[in-house]
Amino acid sequence: MFENTVAKRIYNLQTESAFKILAKAKAMETEGRSIIHLEIGQPDFQTPRNIIDAAYKAINDGYTGYSPTPGYPEVREVIAEYAAKYKGVRTNRDEVVIVPGGKPVMFFTMLMLVNPGDEVLYPNPSFPIYESCINFAGGVPVPIPLTAENDFRIDIDVFKKAVTDKTKLVILNSPSNPTGGVLEKEDILAIAEVLRDRPDILILSDEVYDRLIFEGKAFSIASLPEFKDRTIILDSLSKTYAMTGWRLGYGIMHPDLAKHMEMLMVNSNSCSTAFIQIATIEALTGPQDSAEKMRAAFKERRDWLIEALNAIPGIRCCMPKGAFYAFPDIASFGLKSEEFASRLLEEAGVAAAGGTSFGAYGEGYLRLSYANSLENLKIAVDRIEKFTKTL
């Protein structure tokens, strides 16, 4: 109706397909269908009780109004201390900007750094909002293919060839959504070596899943002294603490960049919710038992699921080293990823996301979120196996 009225830039945005699949699956459930939900990246655990209690207390203590745009100083200080402990990044509150969820850091980074025609290197397949935000800012998305043969790590030779005089920003994501791949320390060091003599190129390091690594530990490029000021760290409480609906994320960056991000915040959101910020202090400094139990549960599910998927004729699946996603290869069945996912939902009652929901290089794959119970995963695998026998 408004095709000739709406600004053309709005058509550069793309949706996050998992939410569309979720809506369709929920509609099918209202019709009486049994659906196993493996489409959405949301922990199936409740937010830890100590965090909920801290939020209640904060509300009763009057934290229901505006806060400073970049966040309360004491909360930003806690985030800085957390980054030093878990990321090995020495920072301070002046380098922290609190935002409502992780996505604003992606969006604001593109608006802040990318001019029309600037090239942005990003992994593919990857979180679809990267490419969406690049396009909205007028940048040129330059995909770096991730392959199963390389455990969905960045191929340094491919990366090196992709860097040009027009490169403005590089996006790193480890552990990865949708593949569960993890960049090893040697990968980060190799990427740093390629970029060492290009100080004009900045890095957006998406570390939302870095507490969900099953072997080894995370390594942030911002922990390298010469790259700290060139890196914007993106993180949130959503996955580690089962707080997806709380919408609390943050960026860590050079103070000069933080001032620009603060300006974008004041022009869009004003500030993040006050009582949730106070609860963040409890999340980051309180007992970490619940976070560790969730990680252990995800690992148990991963171990079972990958073995079960690889036992199905025609399916091959790498062992994801982090996050809570499996990314099985279903190309042998001769269906495009989106058709496979659509028929799997309609015919077998398993909701999953087709690989191309995460970029062109996701063709031939399916993303399964194992943020669901082991019991439901077993039902899902049984249904998947029966479905593949009909193809």
Image (tube, helix red, strand yellow):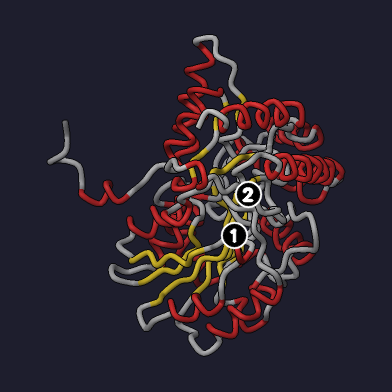
Q: Do the CB atoms of the residues marked 1 and 2 lie less than 8 Å apart?
A: yes
Q: Secondary structure at mark 2?
A: loop
**Which residue lies under the disc numbered 1?**
148
Question: Residue 182's image quarter?
Answer: bottom right
Q: CA distance from mark 1 to mark 2?
A: 10 Å
Residue at the spot 33% in from the left edge and 58% down from the top edge = 135
Quadrant housing the N terminus: top left
Q: From this viewpoint, which residue is outermost toward the bottom?
A: 197
Q: Bin the neighbour count of mark 1 within 10 Å (Cα to Cα): few under 14, some 14-19, many 20 and up.
A: some
**Which residue lies under the disc numbered 2?**
316
Residue at the spot 61% in from the left edge and 56% down from the top edge = 176
Q: Is residue 316 above or below residue 297?
A: below
Q: Secondary structure at mark 1?
A: helix
Q: From this viewpoint, which residue is outermost toward the left?
A: 4
| Image coordinates for residue 3, horizontal then vertical, percent | 16, 38
Residue at the spot 52% in from the left edge and 21% down from the top edge = 26
| Image coordinates for residue 76, horizontal then vertical, percent | 66, 57
Q: Is residue 190 above or below residue 51?
A: below
Question: Residue 188's image quarter?
Answer: bottom right
349 relative position to 121: left or right: right
What amino acid type is highlighted by mark number 2? Answer: Arg
Residue at the spot 20% in from the left edge and 42% down from the top edge = 6
Mark nearer the N terminus (1 vs 2): 1
| Image coordinates for residue 46, horizontal then vertical, percent | 73, 31
The tally of labels here is 2
Q: Bin the neighbour count of mark 2 within 10 Å (Cα to Cα): few under 14, some 14-19, many 20 and up.
A: many
What amino acid type is highlighted by mark number 1? Answer: Ala
| Image coordinates for residue 109, horizontal then vertical, percent | 46, 62
Which of these two is toward me, 70 or 379?
A: 379
Which of these two is toward me, 71 or 116?
A: 116
Q: Is residue 215 above or below residue 312?
A: below
